Amino acid sequence: MYKMQPESSTSQDVQVPVAILGCGLIGISWAALFLHHGINVRAWDPNPAARNALSEKVKAPMAQLADMGPPAITLGILSVFTEMSAALEGILFVQESAPEVIDLKHEIYHNFECCAGPDALIASSASGLSWSSLSSKMSAPERLLTAHPFNPPHLVPLVEMYSPLDAVLDRAERVYCQIGRVPVRMKREATGHIANRLASALWREAVNIVVEGIADVEAVDLALVNGPGLRWAVAGAHMTYHLGGGEGGMAQYLKHLGPSQESRWEDLGSPTLTPEVCATLISGVEAEAKGKSIKELEKARDAGLMRLLAARDGKV
Amino acid sequence: MYKMQPESSTSQDVQVPVAILGCGLIGISWAALFLHHGINVRAWDPNPAARNALSEKVKAPMAQLADMGPPAITLGILSVFTEMSAALEGILFVQESAPEVIDLKHEIYHNFECCAGPDALIASSASGLSWSSLSSKMSAPERLLTAHPFNPPHLVPLVEMYSPLDAVLDRAERVYCQIGRVPVRMKREATGHIANRLASALWREAVNIVVEGIADVEAVDLALVNGPGLRWAVAGAHMTYHLGGGEGGMAQYLKHLGPSQESRWEDLGSPTLTPEVCATLISGVEAEAKGKSIKELEKARDAGLMRLLAARDGKV
C-alpha cells in the first residue's frame, strides 16, 4: 500500500558517477543517498565553504542511513570540484539543488547544456519553481525534469517528478529506485507539487482550529500524530475512504458520506496569518516544544522517522 | 513528540468494571482494549445478534493487541447483558458507541442517569454529534463527555475528548491512558472534532489534485504515505513548520514563508463531488487497490499500523 517500486537492476545512469550541483542541506542529503548506495558522486557548489564542508557533512546522514540498513558493499566515492564543467564530466544524471532563484538555475542549466554529454539528464530539486519556467531557456528543455524531495530527503522516501516525457521519467525512476526512494509521477505541473499542496491544505485547517479556539497548537499536533498522520503513513487519504465504505468501498463511501464531507468542507476555515495569529502559533509551538531546541527536536523527529521506516519497509 | 501521557497509577474508575453500550465495530474495539488491559467489561446492545457475537468478535482485535505487546497478567472478564440497567450495575465509567441517532443516544443517557451510580461518567464515541446536543436532555449534563476514537480504535491511539469540566476530562484521561490511548483535549466543541477536520481539509485537496489532472488517485496516495503522512506520524503540522524555520523556529518560518503559504492557500481547490468526480475517484482507487478486496486491504493497513506502533512507541 505504501511502496510500489519494482526491484530494479542497476540503472545505466548510475553505472557512471552522478553529479550533485548545489551542496546545501538538500544537496548533502542527495550526496549521502548516492554514496550509501555505492554510487560515485561528483559534487560542485560555487561557495568554497560549502565545497570544503561537504565530505564532513555527508557523514551524519550516511550514518543515519547505515543505522537503517547496511550500505552497499563498496560505498560511492565523493569528488568535489571547483568548476561545474569538471563535475559534469562523464555523467549521465545530475541532481541540481541550487537556491530557488530562477536566474541562478538558468545559468546552471546553460552550463549543463554546454558541458554534459548529450544523453545526460538534469533533475531539479526545485520546490516552488515550475518545470516550464525552469526549462524555458534551455535549447533542449526535454533534458530537464523536476524531482522534488521531501525534507529530510535522505529519510523521507518521496520524490515528486514531473516531465512531459515519459521516457525521461522512466530513466529518473530507475535512478531513484536504485537509492531507495519512492518516485511519484505528476501528470502536469502544479505549485507545491502534490505533497506540499496536501500539507498546505492540512495546515490551513490546523491553523484555523487554533484561531477558532477549538484546540491549542500542541493538542492539534498530538491529534494528528496519533490519529490521521499515523494512519497516512500506511494508507493514503483516498484509500482510507475506500476502506471507510465497508464492502462497497469508495462507491459506497461517496454515496453515504460524500454529502457530509461536502458540508464539512463548507465548515473548514480560511485563516489569515495576522500578527496576532502568528503570535499564537509561535507561543503554542513553544509550549509544545517544552524548552527543547530545534536541534533536539530535529534529532527526535529523525530518530522517529528511522524507526518507522525500518519497521514499515523492512529496509531503506 | 508523539506521546505525552503520564505514567499513571490505576484509575479508580477501572478498578470496577466499565460498561460498553453498543457492540458494533467501535464497541468491539473498546471492549478489546479494556479486556487486554485487564479491565472487566459489562457490555450491552439492544440487538441479540450483536450481544451473542461479541465474545467471539473481540478475539481478533485482542489478538492484534497481544501481537504488539503482552496483555495484562490477568485479562479482563467480559459479561454481556440483555438489560442495560444490569450492565450499568456497579460501574463508574461507561463508553457509549451507539449509532449516530440523537434520540437513541438520549434514551441511553436517560437510562444511564436512572441506573448508574451518581459518580459514574458516560463517554460518547460520537463522531458527528456535539456534546451540547448529546447532553441536552440530561438532568446532569456534566456527567457526559465526548470521547471520539479514530478507526480502527484498538490500533490508532487517538481519543479526542470534550467536556466543559476539566475534572471530568482528568478522570477520563486516566482511564484512556490506562488502556494505552492518547487522549487529546478540545477547548470547545466542533464538528469533526480535530482529526476529522484535518482529514477532511487534506482530502478536499487530494480530490482537487485528481480533478485538476495534476496526478491520479494512486499517485496522490503514494505521495502522502511516503512524504507528509510518514512525517506526520512523528511530528505534527505545526511542529513541522517550527523545524522548517531553522534555528529561528516558527517565528522565522512565518516571517519568511508565511506569505508563500497564504498564496498557496489561495491556489488550493474547492472541488464538488459530482457524479463525474465520484466516478474518477472510484476508478482511481480501484486501480490503486490492484484487485485486492476491502478485507485484504484492511488487513494490510492493520499490519502496517501494528508495525509502526510497535516501532514508534515501543509498546501499546
Image (tube, coloured by chain):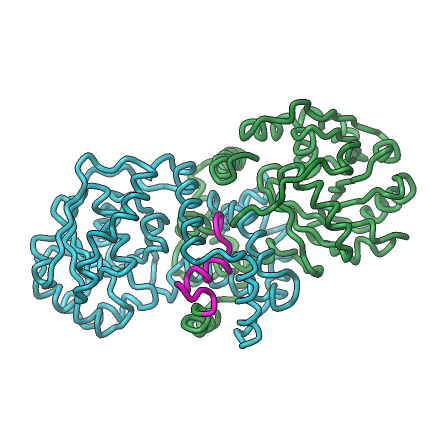
Chain colours: A green, B cyan
Residue A96: image location, x then y, percent: 76, 42
Q: Is residue A76 above or below residue B136?
A: above
Q: Is residue A218 visible?
A: no
Q: Residue at x 44, y 37 (%)?
A: A291
Is residue B211 shown left or right of residue B63? right
Q: What residue range appears in magenta?
A: A232-251
Res. B119 image quadrant? bottom left
Q: Residue at x 50, y 50 (%)?
A: B237
Res. A243 image quadrant? bottom left
Is residue A248 shown left or right of residue B46? right
Residue A256: image location, x then y, percent: 41, 72
Is residue B126 shown left or right of residue A240? left
Secondary structure mainly formed by the magenta segment: helix
Is residue B163 shown left or right of residue B252? left
Residue B306 on the magenta span: no
Query: Looking at the image, which residue sits at the far front?
Result: B291
Q: Is residue A125 above or below residue A91?
A: below
Residue A234 on the magenta span: yes
| Quadrant for the C terminus of chain A in the image | top right
Q: Is residue A258 above or below residue B7?
A: below
